[in-house]
Image (cartoon, rainbow, N blue to C red):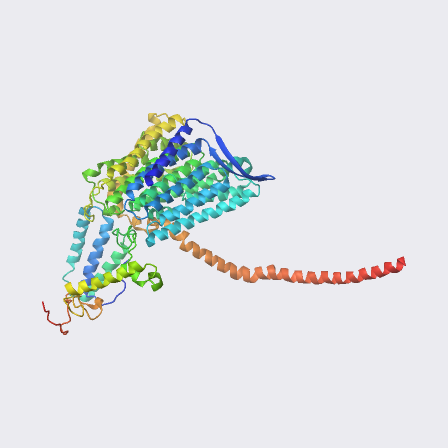
């Protein structure tokens, strides 16, 4: 249930090799059940990776990478291991998640069937907004506390820091 | 509520046990209507088979209701769940007690519908898919049931008391056979059985031990005089199902699915003994299998519960000291499944093995199937007990209500230890004798099995065929019976539409008929017109004649 086939950004060779190693170890976990066996196989695999770590010629390196991916594909497990609450796991999606905002999307006529509840609900919502603005937003008009990234998240480089836009002016707090 | 239902079924079990000691056949019949030779009646047959099977079913369902009270604790739909489960058991009783095909159909469809509702109990996409697969596969069986019902009703025969007469309707008997093998999940209808594992564990325990899948075998036993001509067909089907289920159970990692495949292989074992004529042995194995399989499922459910709904063996933590009772319950059930001496499985399996060894064509395949049974049992208990792969699992404590959950499991286990010898002694009157010469081959066989399973554990794991999808997906049965099967039918229908319906069939069929009928009617009309003239002429002639 992965979307690895969707290439949405340029991946460096180094990252591809790391991903290949991770996938290889995950595949081994599906084959060898006992932890010691898995660790032994992982060390052997790491040794194979390490043997070729100093290759400078990119043509050979890319060929090795492609061969490794081919080998991974040929050795994939028919019944891959998956955690129970992950997609493909045995207990995935058993209890449906019903978001609270679903009630807000009711038709006004439907809402009118429960006047007391909805009056109370609107009141509580206003109270919650007020609470948020008093305690967390510190009286600012806009929510500046969420990390901002003006662009595609997939294009974000791994080391890049996510935070406030440095060009944006923020009012000093009065507290 | 669930506990009330549990008590109800336990009382029913006690009543059944009371009936059991007054052997005889009682038929209660309420006539609905009679006209000429047809009579439709609601009837219940209380005889050896139905009483014994109903007592087992009611005992197991009482234990499972007790279990599900605590297993499904905290679930929002618990009341509806237990009502559905009781509906399931009641339709099973319809199936057991009624000899009439109409009321068998009622119980049959009840089982199909309620099993669908129980499989889709969890609201995930995968369980919805599994439920639909289960329902549609059983619908195929229902269609064949309706075919056979219509064929039998040509002779106004509606119950298996009319066996002697029913033999004349061979086509109907064959359709009935197809119906029963869909319910018992033999090849090619096996794909729904592991899919139905999406249901909660108490449901699996009830469905796959004593009710749904064994309904087919039970009705085969009931209709056995009809099926004599199809025994060779059934032998081949059951041997291949046994092999398929054995390989699948050895390659699967999902704990519940392994138990489901073992159920499938035991079912085909029963089918095999049935189709070689050992019908009473088949029934005996049905009963003993129901007991230990229900307890196996329940103890599996206990582990799943304490592992936070994880069913994969690769995600299991080792058994802590608090789980010794679980582990021993597993061991007893597994040993009974293998036919370890003097457990209930031994009494039923050993009889069949000994008898089949003397004369049987597919003996090698059969022995491989039995070998597979022992292999997957050992594998199951190995991974269940010695598995050290605790790295993935969170720290899981022992479930608080263990004492309530252990009670039904262990009462079933005690039954499955005791009842094998008890039934064979008092009800079936089987005769056992053991000699060294007769039994020594089993010792060698067991040694071979132990050696091969060790080899499997350490060496065969690397063999290429274990990675093949063919073996890991039920011999590609699932795809062939769903997507590819539908595609095949669609292509066939398209070809038929193009080459027959729109061309030759149309030309020689409707258009030809239309043309010939028009020309014929023109001819007839001309006759009619002329005959009017003749009539008028005759009238005038006669008029003149008389004047």
Residue B206: x percent and y percent? 35, 41
- The answer to whether B399 appears left or right of B468 in the picture is left
| A13 or A108: nearer the viewer | A108
| A69 or A137: nearer the viewer | A137
Residue A45: x percent and y percent? 18, 54
- The answer to whether B52 appears left or right of B384 in the picture is right
Residue B539: x percent and y percent? 83, 59
The C terminus of chain A is located in which quarter? bottom left
Residue B473: x percent and y percent? 34, 50
Q: How many numbered marks, from 0 up?
A: 0
The quadrant in which residue A153 appears is bottom left
B346, above or below B490, in the image = above
The N terminus of chain A is located in which quarter? bottom left
- The answer to whether A88 appears left or right of B234 in the picture is left
B521, above or below B42, in the image = below
The quadrant in which residue B340 appears is top left
- The answer to whether B380 appears left or right of B290 in the picture is left
**Residue extending furthest right?**
B547
B67, above or below A102, in the image = above
| B457 or B382: nearer the viewer | B382
Asked whether residue B353 appears in the rendered view, the answer is: no
Q: Residue sitting at 26 percent across and 39 percent down?
A: B381
Asked whether residue B27 appears in the rendered view, the answer is: yes
**Residue extending furthest left?**
A175
Q: Residue sitting at 40 percent across and 55 percent down?
A: B483
């Amino acid at each position: 249930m992965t979307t690895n086939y969707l290439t949405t950004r340029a991946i460096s060779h180094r990252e591809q090799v790391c991903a290949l190693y991770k996938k290889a170890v995950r595949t081994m976990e599906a084959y060898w059940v006992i932890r010691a066996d898995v660790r032994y196989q992982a060390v052997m695999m790491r040794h194979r990776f390490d043997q070729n770590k100093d290759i400078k010629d990119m043509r050979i390196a890319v060929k090795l990478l492609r061969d490794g991916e081919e080998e991974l594909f040929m050795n994939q497990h028919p019944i891959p291991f998956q955690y129970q609450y992950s997609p493909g796991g045995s207990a995935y999606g058993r209890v449906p998640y019903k978001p609270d905002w679903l009630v807000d999307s009711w038709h006004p006529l439907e809402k009118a069937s429960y006047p007391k509840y909805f009056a109370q609900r609107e009141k509580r919502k206003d109270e919650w907004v007020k609470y948020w603005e008093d305690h967390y937003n510190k009286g600012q008009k806009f929510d500046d506390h969420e990390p901002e990234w003006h662009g595609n998240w997939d294009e974000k480089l791994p080391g890049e820091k996510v935070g406030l836009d440095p060009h944006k002016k923020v009012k000093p707090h009065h507290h | 509520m669930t506990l009330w239902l549990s008590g109800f079924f336990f009382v029913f079990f006690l009543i059944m046990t009371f009936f059991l000691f007054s052997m005889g056949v009682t038929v209660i019949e309420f006539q609905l209507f009679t006209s000429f030779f047809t009579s439709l009646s609601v009837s219940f047959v209380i005889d050896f088979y139905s009483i014994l099977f109903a007592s087992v079913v009611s005992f197991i369902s009482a234990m499972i209701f007790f279990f599900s009270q605590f297993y499904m604790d905290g679930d929002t739909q618990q009341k509806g769940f237990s009502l559905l489960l009781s509906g399931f058991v009641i339709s099973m009783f319809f199936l057991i007690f009624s000899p009439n095909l109409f009321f068998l159909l009622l119980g049959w469809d009840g089982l199909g519908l309620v099993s669908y509702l129980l499989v889709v109990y969890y609201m995930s996409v995968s369980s919805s898919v599994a439920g639909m697969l289960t329902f549609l596969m059983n619908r195929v069986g229902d269609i064949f049931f309706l075919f056979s019902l219509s064929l039998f009703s040509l002779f106004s025969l509606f119950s298996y008391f009319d066996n002697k007469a029913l033999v004349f309707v061979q086509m109907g008997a064959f359709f009935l056979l197809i119906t029963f093998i869909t319910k018992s999940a033999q090849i090619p209808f096996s794909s729904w059985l592991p899919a139905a594992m999406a249901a909660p564990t108490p449901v699996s325990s009830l469905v796959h031990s004593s009710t749904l899948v064994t309904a087919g075998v039970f009705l085969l036993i009931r209709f056995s005089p009809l099926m004599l001509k199809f025994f060779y067909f059934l032998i081949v089907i059951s041997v291949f199902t046994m092999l398929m289920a054995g390989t699948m159970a050895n390659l699967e990692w999902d704990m519940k699915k392994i138990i489901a495949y073992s159920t499938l292989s035991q079912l085909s074992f029963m089918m095999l003994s049935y189709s070689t004529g050992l019908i009473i042995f088949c029934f005996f194995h049905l009963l003993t299998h129901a007991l230990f399989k229900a307890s196996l499922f329940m103890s599996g459910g206990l582990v799943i519960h304490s592992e936070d709904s994880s069913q994969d063996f690769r995600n299991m933590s080792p058994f802590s000291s608090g789980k010794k009772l679980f582990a021993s319950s597993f061991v007893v059930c597994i040993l009974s499944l293998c036919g370890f001496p003097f457990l209930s499985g031994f009494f039923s399996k050993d009889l069949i093995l000994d008898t089949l060894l003397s004369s049987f064509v597919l003996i090698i395949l059969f022995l491989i199937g039995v070998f597979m049974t022992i292999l997957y049992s050992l594998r199951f208990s190995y991974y269940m007990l010695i598995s050290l792969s605790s790295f993935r699992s969170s720290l899981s404590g022992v479930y608080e209500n263990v004492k309530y959950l252990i009670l039904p499991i262990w009462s079933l286990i005690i039954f499955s230890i005791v009842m094998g010898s008890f039934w064979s002694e008092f009800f079936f009157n089987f005769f056992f004798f053991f000699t060294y010469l007769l039994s020594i081959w089993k010792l060698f066989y067991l040694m071979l099995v132990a050696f091969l399973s060790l080899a499997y554990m350490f060496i065969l794991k690397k063999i290429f065929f274990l990675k093949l999808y063919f073996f890991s997906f039920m011999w590609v049965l699932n795809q062939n019976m769903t997507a590819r099967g539908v595609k095949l039918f669609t292509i066939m229908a398209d070809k038929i539409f193009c080459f027959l319906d729109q061309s030759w069939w149309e030309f020689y069929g409707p258009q030809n008929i239309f043309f010939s009928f028009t020309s014929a009617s023109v001819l007839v009309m001309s006759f009619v017109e002329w005959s009017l003239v003749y009539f008028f002429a005759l009238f005038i002639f006669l008029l003149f004649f008389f004047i």
